[in-house]
Image (cartoon, rainbow, N blue to C red):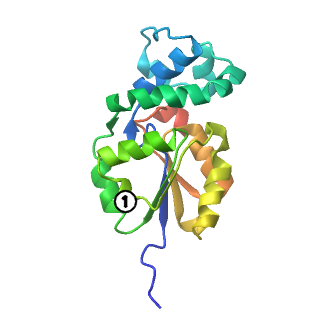
Amino acid sequence: MVKDTHSSAVIFDFDGTIADSFLVALGVVYEAAHKNKSLPKEDISRLRAMSLRQLLQTLRISWWRAFLIVRRIRRLMHGSMNEVSVVPGMVEAIKALQTKHKLFILSANSLTNVRGFLQRYEIEACFIDIVGNAYPFGKERRLVEIIHQNNLLNDQTWYVGDEAQDIKAAKNAGIKSAAVTWGYSNIHVLETR
């Protein structure tokens, strides 16, 4: 019997964690909600200091409207993915991690967008599975599915994200979490979880 040398797993969020997509995604969300109007010049650090609820209120997007425009947002993101670059150092980090850990992605972005991006940076093969189209507040259920489908151990599985709801989803799924501070939320928002 061959010993599994990859007993631990890392599940990555995509937007804001691997892909530096905050400005593009913010523009797309605003455009989808406000019928092709451009996002007014805002203080980006101020927006990063907001929870998702506060961000939607500031952009004048109601919860029900946010859920209704999710598909449109994914479609608009597809046309903007060429503007999105990888977070500096992530390609090297992913390649190093995949030598000792099973790697996965769980993203609210579409599977097509995520796979296309990973192919562009030649890191798609580093991941055992890529799960897209998750709702931001439905990630807990999807994390549990990834854990069960791949026989992962909860105490040896991490979810790496950039938003407070990523940390909450990991806790609720019974796994460890790590947060990056370069994504959609700043450290002050992340520390509240």
Is 169 left, or right, of 157 in this rendering? right
Give residue 50's position: percent from left, percent from top: 55, 24
x 52%, y 31%: residue: 74
- Residue 58 x %, y %: 58, 14
Q: Is residue 61 left or right of residue 82?
A: right
- The quarter of the picture where residue 168 lies is top right
- Seen at 46% across and 29% down, the residue is 77
Secondary structure state at the residue bearing disc 1: helix
Residue at image position (51%, 39%) is 110
Q: Which of 102 and 36 is in front in this view?
A: 36
> As displayed, is residue 33 above or below residue 107?
above
Seen in the picture, residue 47 relative to 20 is either above or below; the reply is above
Q: Residue at x 57, y 41 (%)?
A: 133
123 or 44, which is in the foreground?
A: 123
The percent coordinates of residue 128 (x first, y second) are: 46, 62
Observer able to see residue 100: yes
The quarter holding residue 87 reads top left
Q: Quadrant of residue 181?
A: top left
Q: Name the residue under label 1.
A: 126
How many other residues sit within 10 Å of disc 1, few (<14), some (14-19) or many (≥20)?
Answer: some
Q: How many labels does the image show?
A: 1
Residue 45: percent from left, percent from top: 43, 22
The quarter of the picture where the C terminus appears is top right
Which residue is most to the bottom?
1
Viewer can see residue 51: no
Q: Which amino acid does label 1 sit on?
A: Cys
Q: Is residue 151 above or below residue 177?
A: below
